[in-house]
Amino acid sequence: MDEIGKIDLRHLTIEDYDGLKSSMISAYENWQGAYWDHSSIAKLIRIFPEGQIAILVDEKIVGCALTLRIKYNHFGDSHSFRQITGNYTFSTHSTTGDVLYGIEVFIEPSYRGLRLGRRLYDARKELCEKLNLKAIVFGGRIPNYYKYATELSPKEYIQKVRNREIHDPTLNFQMSNDFHVKKILKNYLPGDAESHEYAVLLQWDNIYYEKQTTGLSSSKPVVRLGLIQWQMRSYKDIEELFDQAEFFVDAVSGYKSDFALFPEFFNAPLMAGYNHLSEAGAIRKLAGYTEQIRDKFQQLAVSYNVNIITGSMPFLSEDQKLYNVGYLCHRNGTFDTYRKIHVTPDEQKFWGLQGGNEVEVFETDCGPVGVLICYDVEFPELSRILAQKGMNILFVPFLTDTQNGYSRVRYCARARAIENECYVAIAGSVGNLPKVENMDIQYAQSVVFTPCDFSFPANGIKAEATPNTEMILVADVDIDLLRELHTYGAVRNLKDRRTDVYEVVYKQDR
């Protein structure tokens, strides 16, 4: 091959026809007459110009990708090439179709090995995303099958290609470009002797596809988080606590945050008036404020247009059981409740707290989120269940008194972000409460963790607060990057789970 100068990828024009025909004849030298006539190419360019892509080397056409846009449910997975093209008239093309259907892709033999085919496939993928279509589908030839047809069925042949026991240049290339095999099509392309007229139905799914709705959607790809690193201080009454809470909600709302995250037991200063009681008695008095605080946060969520994760507070049930609970107050005026599943030995010993039983994902206007309170994040099963339920962001309100305790929360939360391919936001309290028994000192550094891959910070830390200083931390997280990671990550912790060997099961789902 002569030295290559310039490679160009552009839309096909009818003036390209002679060069296209010559290149296609070279590509199918073992298949006489396997090229599109002038009128067919002209019609494709007229009805769907953006779907016809040529690749040129030094201004010479050396390959192309031809495509239709179709309503896939009109055909389903069992069809022939003749049917999908409307008997080669392209009458099946629809401007409202939901799938790109590839009817041709080739590279001239003398230009193979330069990854030019990958450029054509990438251009198709970009078009699919741009048009917000569900997928790219096509029937792929298996040109080496004729060598094995007497000893292998098409199914066996494909399996051996998958296992790298047989090399099929077309099928190997397509699977390496993230297309997955759906089924085998018989009598797909008459005249394809090399494939014995079999084809493999292949599909690439557009992970960015969003179903069209008739109403307005407030779902957004970039979500802004506001983490509140709360200073413990004495309050003369609950109204002073509300003033401080509203100050922070106002602050994160001013930065147009979608979520405000408060720490675990941020309302503990209110126990100062009950030091004459036992520790168990004082925490139960604190539980008397919980519903009032929830109602206030619900009001603030609506007033400041921000979803609020209220940290956590003690809650006394009707049967007098004490739980550690929190609320997700949506900015539409509704709220969800979550409970701490694992209580620490001290919470059980001094306060008599009990663990909850529900592990839930909450749907928000920014997508599905989960909440685990402090100690819960140290149990990887819980976040895995949430990830299986579709969680994108995990919020962890926490309360730790020493750096040892904080390190457990921090490093476990960081691991949860990696293994579940999600964002994890943790927020805690700082300072001290000398007038509250069993709540003497606090240590915290609030952080937003990310997965560790090329689209994210190399250390998996999006943003972190100054340790032991009252402040807010505002950070943006891109949900589309998570979708991309799930499918194209350097490693895929969710996709590669060996569920044939092990599984994590939430018993209430059984």
Image (cartoon, rainbow, N blue to C red):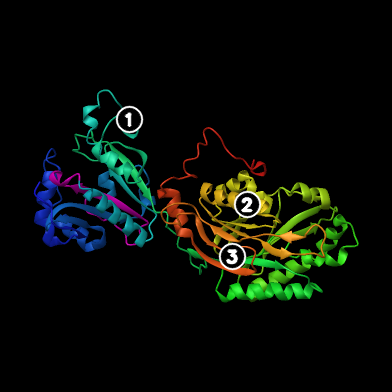
Among all residues in the image, which is located at the extreme top?
151
Q: Secondary structure at mark 3?
A: loop
Residue drawn at (59%, 40%) of the image? 504
Which amino acid does the dot numbered 3 rest on? Thr
Q: Which residue is mark 3?
A: 466
Q: Is residue 373 visible?
A: no
Q: Which residues are magenta?
A: 88-113
Task: Tell me the crowding category of disc 1: few under 14, some 14 to 19, or many 20 or more residues within 10 angstroms, Cα based.
Answer: some
Q: Which residue is mark 1?
A: 160
In the rendered image, the vertical position of residue 387 relative to residue 473, given as above or below: above
Mark 2 and mark 3 residues within 8 Å of each other at the beta carbon: no
Quadrant in the rendering for residue 164: top left
Q: Secondary structure at mark 1?
A: helix
Q: CA distance from mark 2 to mark 3?
A: 15 Å
The residue nearer to you, when weighing 91 against 238, is 238
Quadrant in the rendering for residue 225: bottom right
Q: Which residue is mark 2?
A: 407
The residue nearer to you, when weighing 266 against 19, is 266
- Sequence-wise, the earlier of marks 2 and 3 is 2
Quadrant in the rendering for residue 492: top left
Q: Magenta span has 103?
A: yes
- Sequence-wise, the earlier of marks 1 and 2 is 1
Q: CA distance from mark 1 to mark 2?
A: 48 Å
